[in-house]
Image: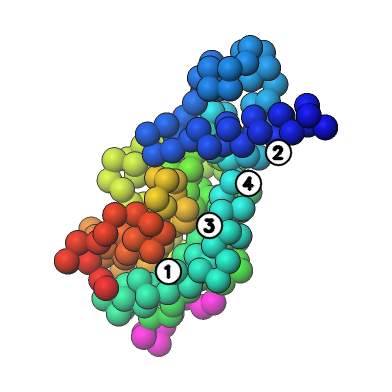
Amino acid sequence: MRNELQAADRVLQVLASFDSAARELSVTRIADTLGVHKSTASRLATTLVRRGFLKRSKRALRLGPEVNRIGLLALGNRDLTALAAEAMQWLCSQTGETVHLAVLEGREALNIGQVDGPAIIGIGNWIGRRTKLHCAANGKVLLAFCGEHLIASPLEAYTARTVTSVKALRAELAQIRRLGWALNTGELEDGLNAVAVPVFDASGHCRAALSVSGPSFRMDPNTYSRLAGQCQQAARLIGFRLGVDKPTAQEPR
């Protein structure tokens, strides 16, 4: 029993070692934190990776998807969709387009929230719908900020515009990280465009992707930058609800 309690305590120590200043930890760092041999820390890390609580990033380790899942459960009544509702309504009113909130589900983006725009020509109900990460704006955001290890090759083509080269996709993800937003121009469905941004929580993790979507005749290259800025404002408000810094006066309240 004592050994089992010690093992459980070590697991909790490892998970508690991650914070906004230490989003990646090496096995050596974990061993030092626990005061154990590197081989012991390596076996513990391997078990946590297998269970989804950690994921490997080059030679380091990051928190895995199972931590996000449990974190969402811990929110209880303050679930992510409810926390995002006000910001999504504001974003819809500002852009006049349909707003979506999506989270990572395995190697797909799961749409968990939607606010419909006022236009007669819309995009239908996407709540509960899963999309591949490489061909949707919210999926690209999740790839860019949650990890490129999620790229599932080969990349399936849904339209003639879908990116099917892993090299080209990685280059686009690097640009998304630089810009802070992603774009989809008819890559999932012909004539359907979208702009998406990440939603970060207080630990600095990308919790979800927030997007606006609409037909290409309303969402063209002249609108992308403006829409991205409005999405970022709304995403910061959601982040505020998740415990991130207080929003500025220019952001929706």
Callout 4 touching callout 2 (CB < 8 Å) = yes
Quarter of the image with the C terminus in it: bottom left
SS at circle 4: helix
Q: Is residue 238 above or below residue 92?
A: above
Say which residue appears at 38% left-offset and 81% top-offset: 117
Q: CA distance from mark 2 to mark 3?
A: 19 Å
Say which residue appears at 31% left-offset and 48% top-offset: 180
* Residue 227 x/y as whole percent: 27, 64
Q: Residues within 10 Å of mark 1 (few under 14, many from 20)?
A: many
Residue under pointer 4: 66
Looking at the rendering, the stretch of residues picked out in magenta corresponds to 118-125
Residue type, numbered disc 1: Ala
Residue type, numbered disc 2: Arg
Q: Residues within 10 Å of mark 2 (few under 14, many from 20)?
A: few
Residue 119 within the segment the image draws in magenta: yes
Note whether residue 153 is visible. Answer: no
Determine the image quadrant of residue 11.
Answer: top right
Callout 2 touching callout 3 (CB < 8 Å) = no
Say which residue appears at 61% left-offset and 60% top-offset: 73
Label at residue 84: 1
SS at circle 2: loop
Residue under pointer 3: 103
SS at circle 3: strand
Residue type, numbered disc 4: Glu
- Mark nearer the N terminus (3 vs 4): 4
Residue under pointer 2: 51
- Mark nearer the N terminus (2 vs 1): 2
Residue type, numbered disc 3: Val
Q: CA distance from mark 4 to mark 2?
A: 8 Å
